[in-house]
Image (spheres, rainbow, N blue to C red):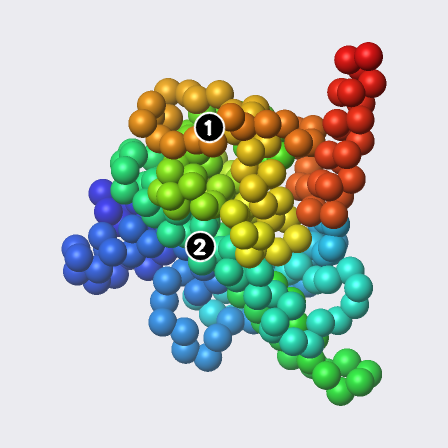
Amino acid sequence: MLKDELRKVGRKVGGTKGDLENRLKSVLHTNDRGWVKRGGAECTKIRYLDSGAHRHVYLQSYTKGPRKGQLCVKKVFKTGSVYESRFFEHDIKVTQEAAKLIGAFNKLMGGRRIYLNEPEVWHSSEPDRKGKRAQYLVEPYLKGDYVKFNSNTGYVESSAKMQALSHHSYEASGGSMLLCDLQGVERDDIFILTDPVICSADHQFGATDLGPKGIDNFFAFHKCGKYCRGDWRRPRQPQVHFPAVRGTTFSSAGTMAGKQFLLHKLLASL
């Protein structure tokens, strides 16, 4: 049973029962499949996949390491090569905090587990024309139908459990954070997410952190489903500050969209 569950998420199945249980509890879906790293992993590019607001995404294949032969994705900044790990600090910070919030939700709910892709900062094996090695994010490729469960402005597409995860993150953090912009795949009785956003009371999670207004906006649109609990906290009187849209909204764009949205509401009321 435990080994079957671990195989579903591509993790090591050797060891004692305690080892297997601890490995299964780990939320992060990693490049090294939970092995202790020995020599690291490598990958090679296959083709371009897509572009977001700041990055290009490429499909790659692991050529070395515990996932050899499997697919991964490489995320590269649009503005060119990035040589310093500090440019990726917000991505790593969001992943680490999101894993804690997901772990708390898994422990509370039981049943179908939720996992989270963990991106790592890798560097090019070959230097560029300047003699520097570019850095980028690499994480396992998610096979299956990719779903956008919600956004960081309160848009909802599907899955009552994912909406409850967002709501519970606000409860578990004491009202200081909201895990949202949930997206990924649902398969074999599990969810695997990637690239989430955290909106926080003090804007500590980068450009997609819409702050208190983002939290407020989410709850203005949120409707509790079968997984939410009545004693979970929520803002007292959540207000709509900007429209709920499917895509990920960045803080500067959110401010402009909010002003346009409120102006439209004002004109409509005249």
User: Residue at point 75% right, 27% down?
Assistant: 262
Of the pair 269 and 37, the residue shown nearer to us: 269
Q: Residue 188: x percent and y percent?
A: 40, 36
**Please, what is the three-letter code of the amino acid marked with disc 2?**
Glu
Q: Nearer the viewer, mark 2 or mark 1?
A: 1
Read off the residue under disc 2: 97
Q: Is residue 215 above or below residue 137?
A: above
Most extreme residue toward the front is 270
**Please, what is the three-letter code of the amino acid marked with disc 1?**
Arg
Most extreme residue toward the left is 17
Element assignment for label 1: loop
Q: Is residue 2 above or below residue 244?
A: below
The quarter of the picture where residue 122 lies is bottom right
Of the pair 149 and 100, the residue shown nearer to us: 100
The quarter of the picture where residue 89 lies is bottom right
The quarter of the picture where residue 267 lies is top right
Of the pair 169 and 149, the residue shown nearer to us: 169
Most extreme residue toward the top is 270
Q: Quadrant of the N terminus?
A: top left
User: Residue at point 38% right, 38% down?
Assistant: 171
Q: Which mark is residue 236?
A: 1
User: Residue at point 82% right, 83% down?
Assistant: 129
Element assignment for label 2: helix
Q: Which mark is residue 144?
A: none
User: Residue at point 32% right, 45% down?
Assistant: 104
